Image (spheres, grey):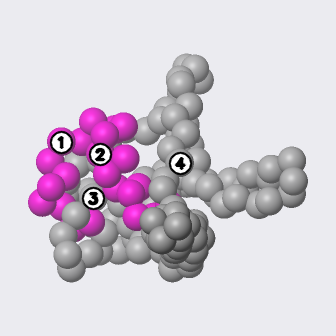
Amino acid sequence: MLKTTNTSLVIVLLAVATSVQAIKPDRTYRFYPEKLGLIYRDLEVVTPDQLKIKTWFYPAQDSLSEEEIGKYWENPVKRPYAVLDTAKRPTIIICNGDAGNMSWQQYSHAMVFTARRSWRNSPANTSSG
């Protein structure tokens, strides 16, 4: 009986701990895409049950040089929304985990999807950024 009670107690404690930590996005953005020189537009998705989800949509775009990225980092200016051309490209949907928010991983994703390779020493990837 004691073993069953202990097991039940552990299950209840895990359930409570899990619900306390469940999906709590950070309400403050680390930075916006213009700080990385990225072209984007705000896009709001509304689910069938009327939940509004804020997203950023990035069209295909040319990579910036490290010098250009540095300039945008120091003086962020939102670039006009434009697409490279009319070619059809796949859309990649990135769903972040339950911590932070969409600003937390945008830089890493931009590096991967725009094939920027020297991102490790850039301003956004340092502890001071």
Mark seen at residue 70 = none
Q: Name the residue under label 3.
A: 69
* Label pair 3/4, CB-CB below 8 angstroms: no
* Label pair 2/1, CB-CB below 8 angstroms: yes
Residue drawn at point x = 31 percent, y = 40 percent: 112
Distance between the alpha carbons at the discs numbered 2 and 1: 7 Å
Distance between the alpha carbons at the discs numbered 4 and 2: 17 Å
Q: Which of 103 and 95 is in front in this view?
A: 95
Distance between the alpha carbons at the discs numbered 2 and 3: 12 Å
Residue drawn at point x = 20 percent, y = 75 percent: 127
Q: Mark 4 points at which residue?
A: 95
From the viewer's perspective, is the residue at label 2 or at label 3 nearer?
2
Distance between the alpha carbons at the discs numbered 3 and 1: 13 Å
Q: Name the residue under label 1.
A: 117
Q: Mark 2 points at which residue?
A: 111
Three-letter amino acid code of the residue under disc 2: Met
Q: Which of marks 3 and 1 is nearer the N terminus?
A: 3
Residue drawn at point x = 21 percent, y = 79 percent: 128
